[in-house]
Image (cartoon, rainbow, N blue to C red):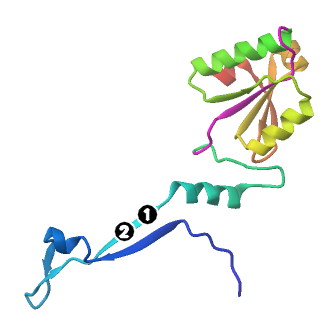
Amino acid sequence: MERKAIEAGNIFNLGTRFSEPLGLMYTDETGARKPVVMGSYGIGPTRLMGIIVEVLADEKGLVWPEAVAPFAVHLVSLGKEGDEISKTADALYDDLIKAGVEVLYDDREVRAGEKFADSDLLGIPKRIVVGKDAVATGEFEVVNRATGEIMKTSRAKLVG
């Protein structure tokens, strides 16, 4: 039977390479002194990132778990520089930063679809969209990247 596996850690047998020069010895059951046989064990951060990508990515891109995501929130402004949407997004960004939230802010002047596709590709756990509806209602669209669930959330809940 074939199964998938991912090597997360590694083990190196160091033998007595370091224990002998250091004089690191132990006494065995017969009373003989012998050099300690050493090993090195580790889990590499780059391997862990690869595992996250391999296991959690979907057809749209990465899906970072909140605990290791480079940002907690991807704030996407659908406005143009200087308009009400952009001003609302800028203010929300400032409030999120002041609240200690790690935010990647997309205020590029490109199409909404391109921003959403890039957001999915990056895989940040939550996307907050600031568009006409958010300005009109004060409710922001929050998209959970892992589940695709969309919720409308007030500014107070986002920064509180």
Which element carries disc 1, helix, strand or loop? Answer: strand
**What residue sits 69% from the left and 79% below the top?**
3
Return the x and y of residue 52 as percentages of the image width and height. 64, 56
Task: Sort mark 2 into few (<14), some (14-19) or many (20+) by Cα contacts within 10 Å.
Answer: few
Q: Is residue 59 magenta?
A: no
Residue type for callout 1: Gly
**What residue sits 81% from the left and 24% below the top?**
108
Name the quadrant containing residue 70: top right
Foreground residue, 150 or 70?
70
Residue type for callout 2: Ser
Return the x and y of residue 160 as percentages of the image width and height. 62, 21
Which element carries disc 2, helix, strand or loop? Answer: strand
The kind of secondary structure the magenta stretch mainly shows is: loop
Residue designated by label 1 = 42
Residue designated by label 2 = 40
Does residue 5 lie above or below 71 as drawn? below
Q: Dots 1 and 2: beta carbons under 8 Å? A: yes
